[in-house]
Image (cartoon, coloured by chain):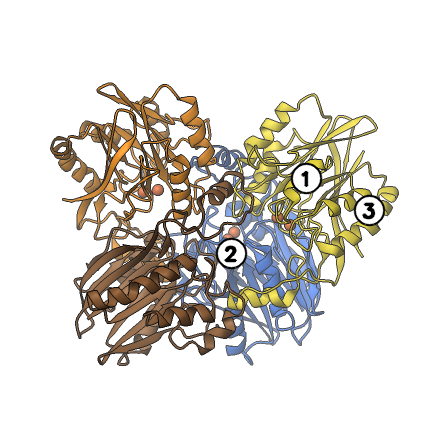
Chain colours: A yellow, B blue, C brown, D orange
């Protein structure tokens, strides 16, 4: 079976390339599951209920989110009615929204959840290692394979989580830095791992935003509007091949230009 | 001409693979300049004068360093006599050691310096943007091309520096995260850029260190020794092709297994 | 002579208590100079030109600012025409606004400037130690005494700056944490020092803001409006007594209830 | 009844002043409970079993710790046998050591525990708000009053915890910054609160360490030994008066010179 994991969708360009590319990719590559992190889908910060629905209609099976989960006002209410969207699992237990999803295709039940890292992250979260352990244990028997997204800044935390979960997950895939890493591999032989899947959106940019104002901010420390950029739109994703036993047999990172 | 930039050398495995691989690569790929970040060369933390000399004898033309520059006791004295080693340029002006190097080959003078990022970094440094601007301006006329290493954590800061220096440098190459990024490209047509070149050392590890104790630290927050690992030794480097005008015409990331 | 240094003025309650209390204090305590940090004067975040003028008319001689200096849109323009307002001195050199002020009274020229700390601070700044050294040296002969405000989070950085400047400044006074410290003292015999002067505004609050939403944010990590609070309004200030030689002979922290 | 809470004991000077002053204070002020944070008791970093025993013999009833809890090698083993020492309660559940203590005197059972803040702290910890809530609830009926220590950097987090626990605790007292705050008060009428109790040890120092090397580190970013200082030794503590109902009726900060 095949899973496509799409990295942080940024703004309108990101949404558009998903809509244009995903249906084709599904068909051409025989993809069974499409999961996408959409924490920057609304103007670069957060997501709305409407945007979530549009993405889900364009061929995405499940949407995950990161530290920008609550950036759009009202989404804390909208999320309740979105049954294919999950917020990071290690947020406080009282947080609205699902902390995991189980997506089914041809009888295979794929568990999907996100853990936030705790190094250099603004949003406070519970231990991602223990959170992942607990979810995997609690849901044992309800899933045939698990994709765990590590939404984090520090490569140390991402690699440590990859090794910690190796052998217990189909895939451990990183997001948040918006830059894909060149380390896609199978850990312990059957857990697909990559520190970061990269960003889906305009790449002539700084993390998806206009170059000039971002440089300006670094130069003079003054706030300024940094709009979502437009040039060099690309979809970044990781394709994982796995068997009925939930073990990955292949992992390939791909980038499709708009 | 060709430049090979080697990412963070970690411990004895890292030094050994440099010694084994670099001479061969130089010959096979017709490399003119070899620059290596060696901030983790001594047992994973810092470098000594002796190690620097050994690396320089094994085919490395210039050594750069990062936030771990002063980890080894005595190196603040040793560095004075090492004329092919530079410490980050945006450290305080009173810091020992060279803040840049000019390496010459066949009449081409290559300027090399490192700037430390300021996001999520323990070591305090002056503005890397202004530091790079000032050095390029001050040394104008003394170099034919410049390689600027961005030793930083945040992808935003690295990309912003890349765009800021694009058109003025032969290459802007990132280090520090120990994980190579999949974004090697020519910015503005002739500045080679990559967010991170990756690590040179044992890859069955967390950033070059043993997996089990690092996971342990994340799990219980207790300190423990995390030795340099041993398995899956690799050299990570970026190869930049450039002309006599200092403009890059090609960039390729490569990883060589030990 | 006597200097009153007023800590971070927060919102309308803060501005009102300054207007109500400062004229009386000036008269009763024979105060010669009144300096106030007003980085939170506009609705808790930043300051406007209009608010600055109102404060200056209510008996404040000089206004300083901190990391919130640019929070109000347009202030980066307004600041140019405000000749008794200075922004932190260790911001980039190209920043708008004065980096120091010299206030004169009865022939005594008091130098006033602020340095931002670099530990745990969002705004990037140059080294506060070197910045203070440089300003004191560059302006030598133009002032009879110097008040250096350390706008910083970490007590280590504030104490270190206090000792570093002891003997060279009339006073080194901290701001930013919004909580006064109980350590007002004369360092090396004649430099008044206090880690933090505390906040001027509503004290039935968290740092001047409404209690309930702030606790809510800590509990669930979700954003919410945290308005300036209203209850228990107080002015926090430090009174420094000093001679014509610029040496402090007394330091007293005081808090006046509204 | 009366409780004396002693702030971070630093090194030998800190231990000595505790030994010299506490027995006298107990007698003179009629103190029933003495609690002391001793996270810096061993050479400024951590504590040993032997030091803990000595402190407990010198009139301290209970010892608390902070982010430096595991700095001394072997203490993770020693702590098991120390029945009047607790480590921060919001460390991972698997951590060695007690997460709370109940100290009894004249039939009054005083619950004592520490929570670590999560803003600007190196050690990762679970949510201090939820941790405190859970402990208070779980132990309900087993204590007559509770002293909750907030070992944290950010004043916002400390104040928010103070208000959150006001009415449910006898006292909420801060430690970690090593500088006492001037805000000792009764919140909601009967919970004693102070952002920081301050340090017990040499005050001619930076947070208890020698001034010159610490300034040196800020100036050049180079590591150097920063020994525990010697001059101006003081004990910093907060005295809380409370009734049999566990409600505080008075709070007074005091500093005793050696
Ligand atoms: Fe993110
Ligand atoms: Fe993102
Ligand atoms: Fe580094
Ligand atoms: Fe490194
Ligand atoms: Fe501030
Ligand atoms: Fe403030
Ligand atoms: Fe601490
Ligand atoms: Fe401490």
Q: Nearer the viewer, mark 1 or mark 2?
A: 1
Mark 3 C-beta closer than 8 Å to ligand 2 = no
**For marks 3 and 1 on the same chain, the one whose residue lies earlier in the sequence:** 3
Marks 3 and 1 sit apart, C-alpha to C-alpha, by 23 Å
The answer to whether the residues at label 1 and label 2 have Cβ atoms under 8 Å apart is no
Q: Quadrant of ligand 6?
A: bottom left
Mark carried by residue B145: none
Marks 1 and 2 sit apart, C-alpha to C-alpha, by 32 Å
Name the residue at 43% across, 28% down: D95
The answer to whether the residues at label 3 and label 1 have Cβ atoms under 8 Å apart is no
Residue hosting label 3: A22
Q: Which residue occupies the foreground of this view, B150 or C87?
A: C87
Q: Position of residue D9 (x, y in %)?
A: 25, 40
Q: Which residue occupies the foreground of this view, B212 or C157?
A: C157
Mark 2 C-beta closer than 8 Å to ligand 3 = no
Residue hosting label 2: B119
Mark 1 C-beta closer than 8 Å to ligand 1 = no
Q: Position of residue D21 (x, y in %)?
A: 14, 37
How dense is the environment of label 1, judged by Cα within 10 Å: few (below 14), some, or many (20 and up)?
many
Going by the image, does B91 lie left or right of C142?
A: right
| Label 2 residue SS | loop
Q: Is residue A193 visible?
A: no
Q: Nearer the viewer, mark 3 or mark 1?
A: 1
Q: Chain of mark 2?
A: B
Going by the image, does A55 lie left or right of B192?
A: right
Q: Position of residue A4 (x, y in %)?
A: 77, 41
How dense is the environment of label 3, judged by Cα within 10 Å: few (below 14), some, or many (20 and up)?
many
Mark carried by residue A79: 1
């Amino acid at each position: 079976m095949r899973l496509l994991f799409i990295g942080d969708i940024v703004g309108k360009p990101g949404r558009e390339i998903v809509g244009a590319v995903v249906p084709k990719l599904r068909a051409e590559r025989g993809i069974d599951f499409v999961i996408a992190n959409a924490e920057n889908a609304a103007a670069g910060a957060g997501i709305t209920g409407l945007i979530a629905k549009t993405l889900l209609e364009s061929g995405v099976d499940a949407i995950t989110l990161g530290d920008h989960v609550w950036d759009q006002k009202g989404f804390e209410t909208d999320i309740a009615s979105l049954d294919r969207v999950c917020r990071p699992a290690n947020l406080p237990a009282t947080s609205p929204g699902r902390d995991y999803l189980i997506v089914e295709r041809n009888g295979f039940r794929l568990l999907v959840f996100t853990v936030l890292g705790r190094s250099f992250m603004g949003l406070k979260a519970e231990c991602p290692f223990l959170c992942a352990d607990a979810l995997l244990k609690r849901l044992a028997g309800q899933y045939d394979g698990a994709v765990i997204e590590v939404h984090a800044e520090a490569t140390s935390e991402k690699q440590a989580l990859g090794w910690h979960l190796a052998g217990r997950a189909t895939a451990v895939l990183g997001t948040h830095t918006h830059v894909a890493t060149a380390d896609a591999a199978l850990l312990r032989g059957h857990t697909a791992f990559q520190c970061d899947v990269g960003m889906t959106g305009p790449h002539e940019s700084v993390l998806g935003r206009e170059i000039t104002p971002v440089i300006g901010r670094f130069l003079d420390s003054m706030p300024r509007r940094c709009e979502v950029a437009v040039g060099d739109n690309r979809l970044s994703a990781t394709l994982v091949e796995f068997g009925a036993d939930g073990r990955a047999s292949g992992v390939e990172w791909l980038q499709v230009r708009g």
